[in-house]
Image (tube, rainbow, N blue to C red):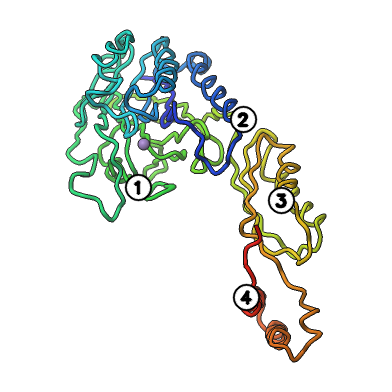
């Protein structure tokens, strides 16, 4: 019987500036996030020891770049490189579209040597062919076999403009190890039906194509959200760990690595037990708050504070988008509110671009012969007799009509 425990991590994009996010972290918080990311990377040897894993599986986009660029990139390359070199267990890397393999890649032995780094040690297996290859896991010869491939460029494409060059990544692949060997597939690619933040595709495949190949487990990278692939009997046959560290708005919610155990007895498929392991001490929360019929600053505060308390924790980074209307004449100091709401959090960014002014309806009605007055009267009559589901639409129409009639500057900045 083969019992194999692993930690799966991908899409760290280590070395990325993290500065372009809508969160707009100020320099000191950005520096803190870089330090936290580095601490996470440096904690990997301890993590694999704590969880007693046999191997570290890394299906791509470990670094945000594929070669040595600026000195900043060099120093961040060094941190992760040194950590992987210190590992006392096998490490398997299948380069992704960001850290793709090429003749100028740091995965290339000559490039590494030219930049004064010692050669990749023997416990680290790097797949460097654009076609799938199979290799025995060091120390597990005849028991565990990895099948993987490397990306060789960083070109993603949009679904509707895909060229023939981007063939189905799994087409033509056949497992070639004996059935009693634990067979793990590892690569970086886009599952057709996975949760995607955007529609860009790299190395497409479907769950059906993957399951038909009968690998015991597939460790896949590229999409930044944790997602498992289960067969028709709900057995896990592969997974995306997602990105382990929250860098931008496409990485909301908890960030994970995968702790897995594969148990293979005989020639049938292995039993896979996997669990997500939270790796980032903070998370990004994208909170949209629809303002109700608020009449005062106090009501606005109460509603937002209640939502924040429910959805975010003190260590989190919150992007708070307010929508709705506030009474005319209500003076709101948005900057002060952002500061005050952010005090109980690591960070808060307030977006009030979608907040508009409501109207003093009573004032319009006092002049029943005005266009606005007659319009309001007509809509209110309709609201009084409308079924419940139409009332909301009519209420919205009331305000949109008034916006048009009064030709008001719609957005309050
Ligand atoms: Mn990728």
Q: Which is more N-terminal, label 2 or label 3?
A: 2
Q: Which is more N-terminal, label 1 or label 4?
A: 1
Mark 1 secondary-structure assignment: strand
Q: Position of residue 60 (x, y in %)?
A: 35, 29
Residue 23 appears in the rendering = yes
Q: Quadrant of the N terminus?
A: top left
Q: Who is closer to the viewer here, 297 or 217?
A: 297
The structure residue drawn at horizontal position 54% and vertical position 44%, both measured from the top left corner, is 22
Closer to us: mark 4 or mark 1?
A: 4
User: Can you say whether 335 is above or below 82 in the image?
Assistant: below
Q: Quadrant of ligand 1?
A: top left
Quote the CA–CA distance across marks 3 and 4.
24 Å
Q: Dots 3 and 2: beta carbons under 8 Å?
A: no
The structure residue drawn at horizontal position 43% and vertical position 27%, both measured from the top left corner, is 9
Identify the residue under disc 1.
Answer: 200
Q: Position of residue 92 (x, y in %)?
A: 33, 21
Q: Which is more N-terminal, label 2 or label 1?
A: 2
Identify the residue under disc 2.
Answer: 29
Q: Which is more N-terminal, label 3 or label 1?
A: 1
Q: Is residue 52 left or right of residue 305?
A: left
Identify the residue under disc 4.
Answer: 407
């Amino acid at each position: 019987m083969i019992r194999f425990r692993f930690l799966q991590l991908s899409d760290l994009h280590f070395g990325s500036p993290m500065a372009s996010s809508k969160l707009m972290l100020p320099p000191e918080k950005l520096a803190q996030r870089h330090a936290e990311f580095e601490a996470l990377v440096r904690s990997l040897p301890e993590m694999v020891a704590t969880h007693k894993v046999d191997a570290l599986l890394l299906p791509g986009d470990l670094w945000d770049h594929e070669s040595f660029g600026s000195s900043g990139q060099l120093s961040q390359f060094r941190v992760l490189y040194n950590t992987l070199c210190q590992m006392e267990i096998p490490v398997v890397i299948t380069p992704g579209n960001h850290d793709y393999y090429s003749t100028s890649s740091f995965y290339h032995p000559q490039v590494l040597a030219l930049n004064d780094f010692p050669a990749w040690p023997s416990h680290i297996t790097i797949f460097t062919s654009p076609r799938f290859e199979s290799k025995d896991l060091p120390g597990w010869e005849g028991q565990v076999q990895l099948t993987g491939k490397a990306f060789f460029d960083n070109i993603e494409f949009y679904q509707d403009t895909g060229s023939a060059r981007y063939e189905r990544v799994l087409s033509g692949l056949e497992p070639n190890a004996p059935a009693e060997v634990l067979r793990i597939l590892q690569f970086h690619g886009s599952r057709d039906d996975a949760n995607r933040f955007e529609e860009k595709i790299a190395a497409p495949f479907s769950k059906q194509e993957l399951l038909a190949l009968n690998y015991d487990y597939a460790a896949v990278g590229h999409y930044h959200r944790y997602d498992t692939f289960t067969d028709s009997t709900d057995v896990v046959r592969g997974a995306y760990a997602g990105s382990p560290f929250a860098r931008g708005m496409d990485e909301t919610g908890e960030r994970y690595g995968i702790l897995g155990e594969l148990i293979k007895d005989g020639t049938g498929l292995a039993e896979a037990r996997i669990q997500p392991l939270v790796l980032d001490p903070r998370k990004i929360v994208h909170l949209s708050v629809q303002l109700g019929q608020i009449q005062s600053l106090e009501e606005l505060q109460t509603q937002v504070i209640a939502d924040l308390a429910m959805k975010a924790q003190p260590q989190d980074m919150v992007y708070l988008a307010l929508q709705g209307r506030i009474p005319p004449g209500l003076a709101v100091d948005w900057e002060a509110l952002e500061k005050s709401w952010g005090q109980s959090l690591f960070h808060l960014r307030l977006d009030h671009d979608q907040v508009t002014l409501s109207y003093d309806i009573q004032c319009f009605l006092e002049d029943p012969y005005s266009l606005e007055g007659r319009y309001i009267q007509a809509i209110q009559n309709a609201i009084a007799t409308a079924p419940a589901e139409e009332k909301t639409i009519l209420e919205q129409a009331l305000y949109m009509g008034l916006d048009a009639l009064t030709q008001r500057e719609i957005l309050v900045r």
